[in-house]
Amino acid sequence: MAWLNNDEVDAIAKDLDVKPEIVRDMEGRLSAFDAGYDASPSDDEESTYQAPAYFLDDASADPATQLEDSDFEEDSTPSLAAGAEGIG
């Protein structure tokens, strides 16, 4: 796909009722590289780490989540023990 010349940009901008800068921005986005989500089977081991699937967050490694889980266990265990004593 070839880049648009100024006349084409102006015509598209007029048709869409936007500024020519917006058309240039859209053109740049449309010509950008689209990476696949998963690594392709033909990728070697040294380049597969670049696939977006390998950038997902691991919620279990989040310090806030670990603290919440720890606080829940520390708070609920004595409460459950006290409740169990009252039943028996």
Image: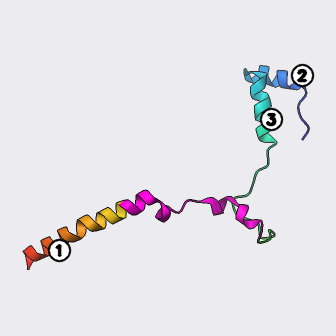
Name the element at disc 3: helix
Task: Please name the residue that numbered disc 3 is placed on.
Answer: 27
Mark closer to the chain start, 1 or 2: 2
Image coordinates of residue 31 in percent, x first then y, are 82, 42
Image coordinates of residue 33 in percent, x first then y, are 79, 49
Name the disc covering residue 30, or none.
Answer: none
Looking at the picture, the colour scheme in use is: rainbow
Name the element at disc 2: helix
Q: Name the foreground residue: 52 vs 70.
A: 70
Residue at x 8%, y 80% (from the top left corner):
88
Task: Please name the residue that numbered disc 1 is placed on.
Answer: 81
Q: CA distance from mark 1 to mark 3?
A: 65 Å
Name the element at disc 1: helix
- Chief secondary structure of the magenta span? helix
Task: Please name the residue that numbered disc 2 is placed on.
Answer: 7
Mark closer to the chain start, 1 or 3: 3
Residue at x 88%, y 31% (from the top left corner):
4
Q: Name the foreground residue: 46 vs 18.
A: 46
Picture quadrant where residue 38 is located: bottom right
Image coordinates of residue 58 in percent, x first then y, are 53, 63
Picture mark count? 3
Mark closer to the chain start, 3 or 2: 2
User: Magenta segment, which residues?
Assistant: 46-67
Q: Residues within 10 Å of mark 3 (few under 14, many from 20)?
A: some
